[in-house]
Amino acid sequence: MQLIRKLLFPFSILYGSIVWLRNKFFDWNILTSKVYDFPVICVGNLNVGGTGKSPMIEYLIRLLQDSYNLATLSRGYKRTTSGFYLLKGNESAALTGDEPLQFKQKFPSINVAVHENRQAGIQQLRRLNPQPEVILLDDAFQHRKVKPGFSIVLSAYHDLYVDDFMLPTGNLREPKTGIKRANLVIITKCPIDLNKKQQEKIRKKLNLQDHQQLYFSSILYDESCYSISDVKSLESLNNFTLVTGIANPTPLVNYLEENNLSFKHLAFADHHNFNEQEIAKLNKEEFILTTEKDFVRLKGRISKEKLFYIPIKTCLLNNEDEFKKELLKFIDEY
């Protein structure tokens, strides 16, 4: 596979040139972006998938939901519907997309919507009563028809965007110069003990502009796993089946192995829609541990006595108070 991707390098140059030119058209106002008079915060990346956007959106929800009327807007990847859809929380993941459904079920008091057209989705959300005061855009950094007031770009510690190439040779959605549009950059999935010297080394490597802030975050895994009606400690698990349909399951696998747990791993593609044959096979397993995102797709189809998930949270490793202050300052300026 790596050899094939290297052979496709000329196409990476072509694709990168097209995306670069498109971005320049927006920068030169040949193509227009919609600007809003209320806070719109975008969470995105330059790489394809696996940077931790969902945990970051949840981090922002926890930070803001008690102070503002909040809404999230996602594309609703691989959903069977189209157009604007405002989630109730009792839908199937196939109808809404897995990540939006996860947001709504974890935070039922906020508005969670999907629309493949972010401009139209924002317009529909602002028609709600009461009107959302802050809108979080999930994975919309390349959606240039919307110009968010504040952009957060994520890059995974083990897959920094500066070390990557354009698709299809690498995993970059757009040239590295696109980082200039970010207000701040967060290096995600860092080791929890990442020290100041290591952080400074990455800071120099990224060479961000003076006004751009750099933060480092890590993923915290719960010490328990949860079903619809039960809770078990991880240390009590033995010889279970781990089922993942996410872009990069390696950190979760490593965490479970570090806890000396015995399991087999069934890995599926990101946002995988499980067919009936796969569900039948999974129902033969004695105990299944999965991610939150996969849980919303599997629950109701796998026996609830055997299906559990492990929650995760984002934690900032540096200057968390400064991050909160910068974000709240942006919102309160409107």
Image (cartoon, rainbow, N blue to C red):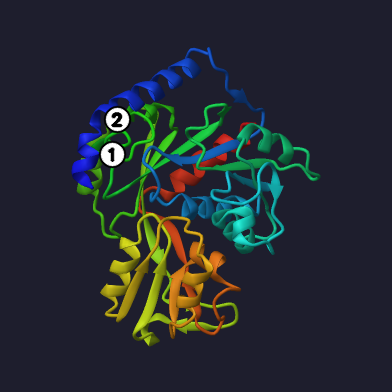
Mark 2 element type = helix
Q: Position of residue 161 (x, y in %)?
A: 30, 38
Residue at the disc numbered 1 = 170
Which residue is located at x 57 percent, y 22 percent?
A: 33
Residues at marks 1 and 2 touching, judged by CB atoms closer than 8 Å: yes
Q: Position of residue 63 (x, y in %)?
A: 56, 52
- Residue 8 in view (yes/no): yes
Q: Amino acid at mark 1?
A: Gly
Seen from the viewer's position, the closer of residues 174 and 135 is 174
Residue at the disc numbered 2 = 12
Q: Amino acid at mark 2?
A: Ser
Please, is residue 106 above or below residue 117 in the view?
below
Farthest residue toward the front?
A: 277
Please, is residue 20 above or below residue 98 in the view?
above
Left or right placement of residue 50 versus residue 228 in this view: left
- Residue 68 in view (yes/no): no
